[in-house]
Image: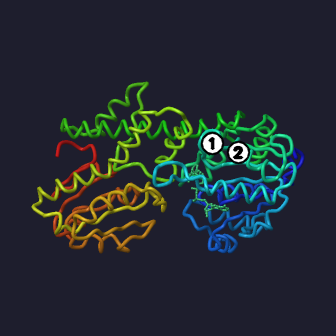
Amino acid sequence: MLEKIEGRKAEIAVIGLGYIGLPTAIMFANAGFHVTGYEIRRDVVEKINSGKAHIVEPEIDDLLKKAIENGTLRATSDPGEIKNKDVYIICVQTPLKEDKTPNLEYLQNAIETVAKVMKKGSLIIIESTVPPLTTAKMAELVERITGLTPGEDFYMVHAPERVMPGRIFKELVYNSRIFGGITPESAELAERLYRSFVKGQTFKTSSTVSEVVKLMENTFRDVNIALANEFALLAHQYGIDVFEAIELANTHPRVKIHVPGIGVGGHCLPKDPHLLVWPAERDFGLIRLAREINDSMPLLTRELLFNALHEANVPPNRAVVAVLGLAYKGNSDDTRNSPALAFIGAIRDDVAEVRTYDPFVGGTHKNLEAALKGADAVVIATDHTAFRSLDWEKLGMLMRTRVLVDGRHVIDEPPRGFIFRGVGRGRY
Ligand SMILES: NC(=O)c1ccc[n+]([C@@H]2O[C@H](COP(=O)([O-])OP(=O)(O)OC[C@H]3O[C@@H](n4cnc5c(N)ncnc54)[C@H](O)[C@@H]3O)[C@@H](O)[C@H]2O)c1
């Protein structure tokens, strides 16, 4: 296997061609490996094979086209086409169920598919983020289906992904990576494989350590954002601007307060803290409380909006509200768990009309001016770069009432003539 990997002769199947799987498949294909992408969504398969990506990401179209034209990447929905591969890289989603427990159905189905087509000696790599102990359990599942012994007849690794959408192709190369094997040999093989394009540091460990490391990283961020959000709530009490206070606090050499806002979204941050504590036998208060604080931020933004409408003498049930941004983060088209959607859900029944505009996602209105025409309030829910340099004095002329709520700190100086509120921006 090692010779095949070093000689770029190992045949690779990537299971699940989403935000993580497609870029990963492209990287291996452009590093010289033959890659088959297996994806259950036929529309996605067709699009990829025609050389077009179904996700928005800088550089992706050129890099995908190159791999397709070189013949090193092909997508399929036929499990027969991923038979007897040397390496299987699993990149399926691992969301939460309604009750906030992990939904591991996608992962289990992917593992079952792989177990049915793999060969003795295959290397299975899970890139999906999973609860602690899952990789070992999935190795047992493969053993039950195939009769092969984990670590002897096949190799298995958890190799978590740390990329940030918008910077995926840079971070895939330069981020450091962890390879958690069910055996040291498994980790060694995966590390050698990824060294074909990774220039960052690489580390080997056990699969459970690797699972915990990935989840700790996102939990660290979630808890710190919750703390910043709590500081924002305090700033409203004391009538100060939390961003000024944070900037000054961060001049301390050992302080790095995160950024407060309308909430935390995306596929990962809202779910990973739940994955981390789920298999544990006792409860973990701080991690759960942080989740609750972050989930409550769209409701704070609702409070800011209604407070400003009250000052403007507009009854909420007559208010036309334009929400700018649907994606969970700036310059992305990803709306998964977006706080913008949670915010809209929280106001929809109480206002006359909700309009939405997002240059990456779409929305009820295709252009900003149309969304603002005759509106009573505008709420910024995503920090798209384009929202940072808007001419508010001009846009305000289109509006019926000039209420502006900034959920993402994209506005430094409240524009003249507006009733302004912002998360963490003083008393209201
Ligand atoms: N998106 C990120 O920024 C990011 C960052 C780090 C880690 N992760 C983790 O990576 C994993 C994948 O995330 P994503 O954002 O790429 O998800 P995604 O939803 O964009 O992609 C998953 C893809 O897998 C396909 N799929 C589901 N079940 C399948 C099966 N049995 N066989 C074949 N295809 C199947 C889906 O149709 C989908 O296209 C998750 O565990 C996530 O937590 C994501």
Give the quadrant of ligand 1.
Answer: bottom right
Give SS at disc 2.
loop
Residue at the spot 74% in from the left edge and 38% down from the top edge: 181
Q: Is mark 2 within 8 Å of ligand 1?
A: no
Residue 136 on image: x %, y %: 70, 41
Residue where numbered disc 2 is placed? 198
**Viewer-side residue, 210 vs 144:** 144
Q: Is residue 296 toward the left or the right of residue 108 in the image?
A: left
Residue where numbered disc 1 is placed? 175
Is the residue marked by circle 2 packed among few (<14), some (14-19), or many (20+) residues within 10 Å? many
Residue at the spot 79% in from the left edge and 59% down from the top edge: 116
Q: Is residue 84 toward the left or the right of residue 89 in the image?
A: right
Residue 54 on image: x %, y %: 58, 68
Three-letter code for the amino acid on which mark 2 is drawn: Val
Q: How far apart are marks 1 and 2 (CA)?
A: 8 Å
Q: Residue furthest left?
A: 313
**Viewer-side residue, 269 vs 418:** 269
Give SS at disc 1.
loop
Q: Is residue 105 toward the left or the right of residue 199 in the image?
A: left
Q: In which quarter of the image is residue 175?
A: top right
Three-letter code for the amino acid on which mark 1 is drawn: Asn
Q: Is mark 1 within 8 Å of ligand 1?
A: no
Q: Residue furthest top?
A: 253
Q: Do the residues labelled 1 and 2 touch (CB within 8 Å)?
A: yes
Is the residue marked by circle 1 packed among few (<14), some (14-19), or many (20+) residues within 10 Å? some
Which color scheme does this rendered protein use?
rainbow
Q: In which quarter of the image is residue 238?
A: top left
Residue 393 on image: x %, y %: 21, 62
Residue 84 on image: x %, y %: 85, 59
* Above or below for 32 versus 251: below
Residue at the spot 28% in from the left edge and 68% down from the top edge: 354
Between discs 1 and 2, the one toward the N terminus: 1
